Amino acid sequence: MTDVKLVRNVAILGHGNCGKTTLAEAMLFRAGKTSRLGKVDDGSSNMDFEPEEIKRNITIGAAFNHYTWKKHEVFLADTPGDDNFINESKFVAKVTDAALFCIGAATSVKNQTTKFTDFIEERKIPTIICITRMDRERANFTGVIEGIKANLPLKPAITYVPIGAEANFKGIINIITQKAYIFDDKGKVQETEIPADMADEIGGYRESLMEQVAETNDELIEKFLEEGELTYEDLLDGLKAGIKSGEISPVSVSAALNNQGIEMLLDMINDLLPAPSDIVPHVGTNPKTKEITEREARADAPFSAQVFKTMADPFAGRLTIFRVFSGTLGGDSFYNATKDISERFGQIFILEGKNQRPVDSVGPGMIAAVAKLKETVTGDTLCVENEPIIYEPLTPIPAVISYAVTAKKGDEEKLFGSITKMLDEDLTLQLTRDNQTKEILISGVGQVHLEVIGEKIKRKFGVEMELHTPKIPYKETLKGKARVQGKHKKQSGGRGQFADTWIEIEPLPKGGGYEFVDKIVGGVIPRQYIPAVDKGIQEAMEKGILAGYPMVDVKVSLVDGSFHSVDSSELAFKIAGSLAFKKGAQEAKPVLLEPIMNISIRVPEDCVGDVMGDLNSRRGRVMGMDSEAKNEVINAQVPMAEIQKYAQDLTSFTGGRGSFTVSFSHYEEVPAQLAEKIIEAVKQEE
Ligand SMILES: Nc1nc2c(ncn2[C@@H]2O[C@H](COP(=O)(O)OP(=O)(O)OP(=O)(O)O)[C@@H](O)[C@H]2O)c(=O)[nH]1
Ligand SMILES: [Mg+2]
């Protein structure tokens, strides 16, 4: 196994379409891991290998590979940039030692870009800023750098500068060594003179870099002020320290599709990013003593790892992917501290795109996988039983969009079995049942997310799901009072049926449910029939009189009645109770209730006006506002019926910069005009 000092664990992060996967392909190719440059556009990528990814030319699931470059063993994770799949990126960012933060040279800082820098900020992940697609039209190095400085929390340290741009991107200058390189057509480089017209500019960059590095360290700033210079060693050491602490991020430039700038990036990963053992020890909790516990990334430390991804496969079984934090895993079992169980496994694998390479053991910094585990799920900590540790669990991004789901060809059991398998793989996916509407609801992060789940289920398990807009679980209640008689009388040869009841109906406060009060005196209705009246009322309440929705928050008192010694029965009183209630409900001002949701919407300040205006048009009520570091949080209440498509709408009017969470709050009366329409629609349907 490679010495931990020579291991690197790097995640590629950045907004959609900025060239992350292409960069990964170029790195693997340049390092000799792959024999030809995989391309996203023609489906030949090693990292975007799932059919759903190839169809859309986007990354959907995080993918892993590793390469060796100048004796270093680098574990690479390529992650999605699309909002629908950002949970994959979030989980990878929780376990990685370093990030390559990608940003297109022509597109600059996009709306969703900050979501990725938030992941980086949260753990202060040592990061290289990769300016990608330098060969594209309108590629503008200084423009992007300005954009980053103005809009992102990262502090770029300019370590490389491009020579030329767009079709004329032909080389790179290393600011630390002050050496210039020109690309040849095989993706390699040749040293050359710094172009005369760039000399001043490069001198300026060097000056700024020294100053920037010096500022991160008191000793260095003193030296710098005294001597006006930093030695090469001081500059390099200072830079490494600044990167490790997350204070500054060196910049690389590349055009991965043409293999340009890749060699420098591979060198930067080796030379500038910390090894697992250089990073502060990973902190968790000892589940037995509840004490904070640390693990150093040494191969001879007690083994610990965290599962951050699970893949469902109908043939190979479940694939459990984990990152080793400390120690060495070999043998055939480990202890799952989160579940407090031991699990056996067959073979340990290292992932190479869609392929898996068997290995005997894995150590700190490595990303590995085992197949067919039964109990272990994403987020669990694996370790040795006598030295247990649990790392912070992984919290998925909340689901915000729901559909009613049915099987296309009636194979419900197979469908729900398959969706259940997908739940293991995708913690943002949820399957619930609405007790009232009896619909099964599938919830996810966005429209495309659920579409992709449908495609995966079809491909992997051969069953198709259909999505429908869910029914709203309306309810009914009463606003007035009534005193009515319910009489059931039937004379048909033989024994007849007779029951006579008088009830008083009145509303209960919100959430009051149902209350039955027995006010019969003098035995006008015999004891044994009274529960039957109650039952009859409850049955009538299951289907309200307006549109058949369940009735709630009513108090019914049984106040009077009469019976017949031969013809009365429990059944007769049940029917009478039911009749009485239906009649009374008509008279007691029945109204329709609708579910109201709590919604928290996070948007940048300039979107607040739009969000408020839009909420207004959705019958929403703003309850309050909070400010966070970068966003405003609008807390509101809004009817469920008005936000069934909110995920798409918010994305479109904030340009993808907004996010939200919803939860059920309470029921409220539907405004009369709307209620009429709903009742009409139900009648039409019937
Ligand atoms: N000209 C040029 N095009 C590039 C370069 N890198 C990527 N592209 C193109 O940009 C598009 C997106 O590239 P990807 O590598 O899939 O981008 P990504 O960041 O992985 O996208 P997501 O995974 O969906 O977030 C593809 O059409 C690539 O061919 C580059 O260096 N130069
Ligand atoms: Mg990609």
Image: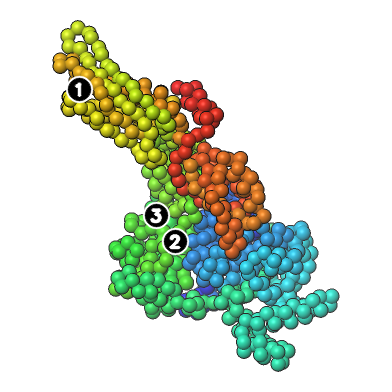
Q: Helix, strand, or loop for circle 2?
A: loop
x and y percentages locating residue 610 in the rendered image: 65, 48
x and y percentages locating residue 326 in the rendered image: 41, 74
**Is residue 113 among the parts visible in the rendering?**
yes
Say which of marks 2 and 1 sits in front: 1
Callout 3: CB less than 8 Å from ligand 2: no
How far is disc 2 from disc 1 in space, using C-alphas?
A: 64 Å
- The residue at the far left in this view is 565
**Crowding near the residue tagged with mark 3, few <14, some 14–19, many ≥20 C-alpha atoms within 10 Å:** many
Q: Answer whether labels 2 and 3 touch (C-beta < 8 Å).
A: no
Q: Nearer the viewer, residue 28 or 513?
A: 513
How far is disc 3 from disc 1 in space, using C-alphas?
A: 68 Å
**Is residue 133 among the parts visible in the rendering?**
no
Label 3 sits on residue: 318
Label 1 sits on residue: 524
**Of label 2 and label 1, which has the lower sequence position?**
2
Q: Helix, strand, or loop for circle 1?
A: loop
Residue 183 lies in quadrant: bottom right
Say which of marks 2 and 3 sits in front: 2
Label 2 sits on residue: 394
- The residue at the far right in this view is 197
Please state which amino acid type lies under the numbered disc 1: Val
Q: Nearer the viewer, residue 61 or 589?
A: 589
**Of label 3 and label 1, which has the lower sequence position?**
3
